[in-house]
Image (cartoon, rainbow, N blue to C red):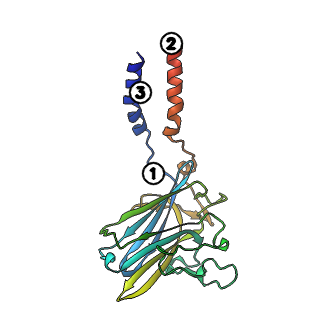
Amino acid sequence: MYNIILFLLILVTPFTLQQQQIDTSQLPGALSQIPLSDGMSATVQFVQYSDHLSYTLYLNPNNVQYWNTSICLAWIVGTPSLLLDSTHQCSFMNDTSSKACIPDIPSNPCITPIKLPDACSNIETLSGSYPLTSSSYTTTTPIISVNSTNTQIYPNARNTVAGKSVLISLTENLNGTQQQFVSCSNIRLGNGTSSNFTYYPVNNGTIQFPNHASRRLLSPIVLLPFIITLFIHTLNVIFK
């Protein structure tokens, strides 16, 4: 009898999880779009889950054969906001005071990682690098995804990416000379996909979250052990 019940659980569980699967495009999130050299661009998309924040970095080569010259792509999530986002200039890097966010960036962050002083941001800054010489993407491609349990998108949260920016560094080898392209962009809240994203409206400086975006979602995977335990307990009572 128990073998039959176990078999039924194996059949039903995947179907139940599939039915309850979360549509991430409807979850609260954020987006930052950063232009790179030669018409290329990078996009960082954030998705807020109930227990963590996830971000994915996309590279759009724009039909550029970047692997012939590009060496390293590096990024920092959570840098200070830009005064004028349309310029994509990382103005905070010009701060020469003792509280300068990022005094300089290594010429090749894939070899020498970027060092982040405490003055850079009061949140958990998320940085990384990705070597481009061994890749050959021709279309927009996600190159890395990162999860953080210490960061959120909600403006009132203690550690939030709202009101912050993303810095992207692209190191290239042009005619034997190593050059670096640095660009920044503010993080804007909303929801959707990386190619079809809707920004939340701002009213008198306050971001207007849709009702569904403020709800805390509980993953069905978290509930699964409880459901199975309750089911087995019920069967024990019935067949006792």
Q: In the picture, residue 135 is in which quadrant?
A: bottom left
- Report the Cα–Cα distance between label 1 and label 3: 27 Å
User: Of helix, strand and loop, which one carries label 3?
Assistant: helix
| Left or right: 101 as drawn, with respect to 235 | right
Amino acid at dot 2: Ile
Check whether the beta carbons of the residues at disc 2 and disc 3 lie within 8 A of each other: no
Three-letter amino acid code at the position of disc 3: Leu
Q: Is residue 19 above or below residue 71?
A: above
Residue 172 percent location from the top left of the image? 40, 81
Residue 34 at x, y percent in the picture: 46, 73
Q: Residues within 10 Å of mark 2 (few under 14, many from 20)?
A: few
- Mark 2 and mark 3 lie on one chain; the one further toward the N terminus is 3
* Number of the front mark, 1 or 2: 2
| Residue toward you, 186 or 204 | 186
Q: Which mark is residue 24?
A: 1
Q: Label 1: few (<14), some or many (≥20) within 10 Å?
A: some
Residue 25 spot, x, y in % from top left: 44, 53
Provide residue 2's location: percent of width, then percent of height.
Answer: 42, 18
On screen, residue 154 versus residue 169, left or right, reads right
Sequence-first tag of 1 and 2: 1
Q: Secondary structure at mark 1?
A: helix
As drawn, the label of residue 238 is: 2
Residue at 54% x, 41% y: name it: 218
Does 81 appear above or below 181? above
Compare residues 1 and 238 and report the one nearer the observer. Answer: 1
Tag 1: amino acid:
Thr
**Quadrant position of the N terminus in the picture:** top left
* Disc number placed over residue 9 in the picture, else none: 3
Report, in whole angstroms, how far the alpha carbon at label 1 lies from the one at label 2. Answer: 40 Å
Foreground: 16 or 121? 121
